[in-house]
Image: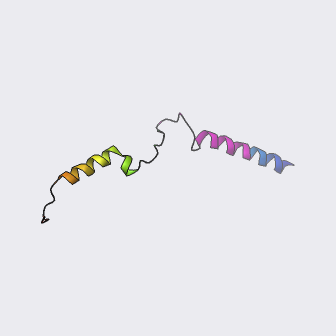
Amino acid sequence: MIYVLAAIGALTVVVLMWKAFGPQATGVAGRRPRQAPIAPDDDPEFLRRLGEQQRKPRSGEDD
């Protein structure tokens, strides 16, 4: 019987720790929410650099 109570107590502690420090914890100092990755064709910075690279004349190529 004591083992059942110990198991329930341990499970309770684990659940509380998971709720407090798990991946969905909010309001923790120093944590920022993750941003979903941006595909290259949706990233304005990538498209800007790509356009600049295409406008630059490439040195060493004969056209």
Q: Is residue 52 magenta?
A: no
Viewer-side residue, 39 vs 31: 39
Residue 8 relative to residue 24: left or right: right
Left or right, 5 with reference to 14: right
Vertical order, 27 against 48 (above or below): above
Foreground residue among 44 and 19:
44
Residue closest to the eye, 47 or 34? 47
Colour theme: rainbow
Q: Any magenta on residue 13?
A: yes
* Residue that protrudes farthest toward the top in the picture: 27
Q: Main secondary structure of the magenta part?
A: helix
In the rendered image, the vertical position of residue 13 relative to residue 58, given as above or below? above
Residue 2 in picture, x, y percent from top left: 84, 48
Q: Which contiguous range is marked in magenta?
A: 10-29
Q: Position of residue 14 (x, y in %)?
A: 68, 45
Residue 5: quadrant of the picture: top right
Q: Residue at x 82, y 51 (%)?
A: 3
Residue at 46% x, 37% y: name it: 30
Residue 59, percent from left and from top:
13, 61
Question: With 7 as the anchor, is 51 left or right in this view?
Answer: left
What is the count of numbered marks? 0
Q: Is residue 49 left or right of residue 19?
A: left
Looking at this rendering, what residue extends furthest in the front direction?
A: 63
Quarter occupied by residue 17? top right
Quadrant (top left, top right, bottom left, bottom right) of the C terminus: bottom left
Residue at image x 78%, y 45%? 8
Question: Residue sitting at 48 percent across and 39 percent down?
Answer: 33
Counting from the top left corner in percent of width and height, residue 40 is at 37, 51
